[in-house]
Image (spheres, grey):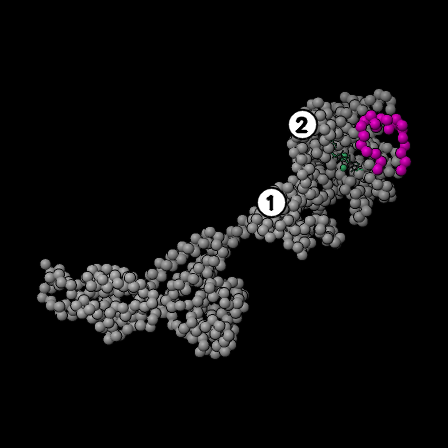
Amino acid sequence: MYKYYNQNFDKDEMFFWLCQMARQFESAVVIINPAKGNVIEFVNHVFTHLTEYSESELIGEKLNILHGPLTDILNEDAIQECIVNGQQFTTSSFHYRKDGSTFWNEVSILPLKNLNGEFQYCLLMMKDVTYATKLDSLLELERNIYFKLENGYPLENVLSEICNHVENTFRIQCHCTIVLIDEKRKVTGVYGGATKTFEISEYQAFFIDKDNRNFSLSLDRNATFIKNIKKTVYYEQYKTLIDKENIVSLWGQPIFNKEEGLIGYFSIYFEEEMEPQATDYKFINTNVTPIVTLAVKYYNQKSAIHSLAFFDSETGLSNFEGFKNKMQTEWEADLGDSYLYIIEPSEYQKIVDLYGRQGGDKILLKMAKRIQNIFAEHKLFIARYTNSAIIIASQLKISDLQFTQAEMDHLLFEPYCINNKDVYITLKVGTSKICQETPINQAIRQADTALSIALKSVGTVIKKFDAEQVESVANEMNVLANIAKGLMKDEFMPMLQPKVDIKTGEINSFEALARWISPELGFVSPALFIPVAENTGNISKIDRAIFKKVLQWQKHRKETNSPMYQVSVNISPNHFYHPAFVENVMELIEKYGVETKYIKFEITESIELDNVMRAKKIINDLMKYGIATSIDDFGIGYSSLSYLQELPFEEIKIDKSFVDNLADPRMHAVIKTIIHLSRNLNMRCVAEGIETEAQHKELLQLGCNSGQGYYYFKPMPLHEVDELLQKNTQTQF
Ligand code: C2E
Ligand code: CA
Ligand code: CA
């Protein structure tokens, strides 16, 4: 039956009734009469408002009055077809207002039929959905932005995309830029298409500086809009710029971060006069700028995370990850051959013991700064390598570095101030070369190997990586495997090196030095097997093996009534601190029946500070039995000066590295101090590693008691010592 209308309606009544109804509607309504060639017969005021045409301009026209250059004609044809055929249809069209501005129009077609099913009128409901459409595309934009930020696209790329998006979707042609500024309102970056034509300085002057301009991009929350800049007084001032870009309307939207700080401007200019509509404001202000804020915030957070991942929070230096990253991204490409240095202060652990972790951090940072100063003119990259070491990449070889003495002194000899205390350090340096054949990761391993070798020497040491070292590391492995066997087969032998009275040249005692000729490995240097034995718990056995051989030799001399000499035996700290050490040595001495005055123990200076009391007890116990002790390698750690008086050593041995540098006035002063100190403390003073006559004379002059070194005698096998003493040679120097 009657489906839609009262059966009494004729066509005119129906039209009248439809118009009445349409006037009440909140959406735009157009009524089209198919009988009259599909022209518009009625429009409501919402529609005139939407399109800006008057009623009389619309009546009798076709829908194509809303078409424009960008309207999708196929879609419009579909609309027409539905109107003609009386079909229901909903679609979105890109339509033009009278003034040429555009909007997304959601068009719904409702065909109206009479009782007999005859198609009478077509009712078109329309709705401006520009905003909603924009929102959809904004969501799309937001997704893209997230994706790009997540995937490490640069901020520039992200902000440019935002500008492009606005340019593509804004209802009239515009040019967009995002300008980021710092707290001082200085431009830090400009993004978007327009950046190609503007200079940063122009942005600074024109868009940001507001001092003498009232149209300026305001600092308050509000957007600034200039309808036609050419009609303002500022045209004169910025004529070239304005004409160059043909700027007519200008719109600046300040961008704030969450904390209400101004971070930049979103600026749009138009080449024609433009009046923003409420929807435009809304689009820019509440939709676009939050995305910018978000992107900037996200980017800042990312870089904060980046800095956490790549920087050492204690020192602010790059960390090792940062180093590798930088080397891989920046360095390898444009620098070619360069050099790596891994540097560790020998005293790092002592500093941490004394001043805590922070002390260790401080020393590394201070050291890094000094090095940075020295390299100031060269490209250099410093990072923290481990807790105790820094790593440096430079194009300079150490030998190319023209250090001035003052720089060198500053780096090496001036104390570092930690917690108001002067701390002196020596450096261990391992170096390697980065080149085509040795990529960065391999070079790092090499420098590390070189460092571990440097760490075995005393004083400041620079070790270059070379293949021999690899061999020596491999050696170490072999050595380790063979030490136990060597001990069982009694392969360790002492050599004796005379200690000579510097004044008379007389041999007054000897030092026993371990030698190992392994059937598998050949001659192995103590510099190699001693550290390996120390690290693997075999050292006491070696010390004892040597000690036994020395006692045997003493016993034999005693039995043959040969003159007796004191022999010093080296004892590693681990062995020295063993609770049964004194007991064990006394047992051996008694077994061989050697008088204790012919025995001395040399202990290296690296006595741990917290062990001072224990060391004192052991030294005293030995002393009670008449056994003297000697502090070996003295002078390497300065801190030892302070606790030396606590420890009743009988002898101090000045380390070879000091004797080597005797010509250096500062070393000279240090040695002089040590000699004076030993005299005050009633200790004998022995200088080791004397190789030249000049060193001998100098030490004689300084009042050192004894000397030891190749200048007098090299270490020699026991039978040679017997022969030498047999001749009862009184050497004169
Ligand atoms: P050290 O106790 O400082 O011994 C002095 C080292 O300097 C010896 O090296 C000696 O041969 C060397 N030397 C002596 N005069 C000169 C010289 O004029 N010029 C040069 N260039 N070198 C000189 P060596 O025998 O290679 O021993 C190295 C280190 O191994 C020793 O240093 C000592 O710390 C350790 N060591 C040796 N034997 C033993 C041992 O039986 N037990 C322990 N625990 N350590 C030992
Ligand atoms: Ca020694
Ligand atoms: Ca020594």
Q: Is residue 515 magenta?
A: no
Residue drawn at point x = 52 percent, y = 73 percent: 211
Residue at the image position 89 percent from the left and 27 percent from the top: 727
Mark 2: amino acid: Asn
Q: Which of 369 and 618 is in front in this view?
A: 369
Q: Is mark 2 on a helix, strand or loop?
A: helix
Residue that badge 2 annotates: 482
Q: Quadrant of ligand 2?
A: top right
Number of other residues with Cα within 10 Å of mark 1, as a class: few under 14, some 14 to 19, many 20 or more: some
Q: How far apart are marks 2 and 1 (CA)?
A: 34 Å
Q: Does the magenta stretch include residue 719?
A: yes
Magenta residues?
A: 711-733
Three-letter amino acid code of the residue under disc 1: Pro
Residue indicated by mark 1 = 439
Mark 2 lies within 8 Å of ligand 1 (Cβ measured): no
Q: Compared with residue 684, is residue 71 higher up or lower down, i.e. above or below?
A: below
Q: Residue at x 90, y 32 (%)?
A: 730
Q: Eyeballing the image, is 484 above or below 348?
A: above
Residue 448 relative to residue 305: left or right = right
Question: What count of labels does the image hold?
Answer: 2
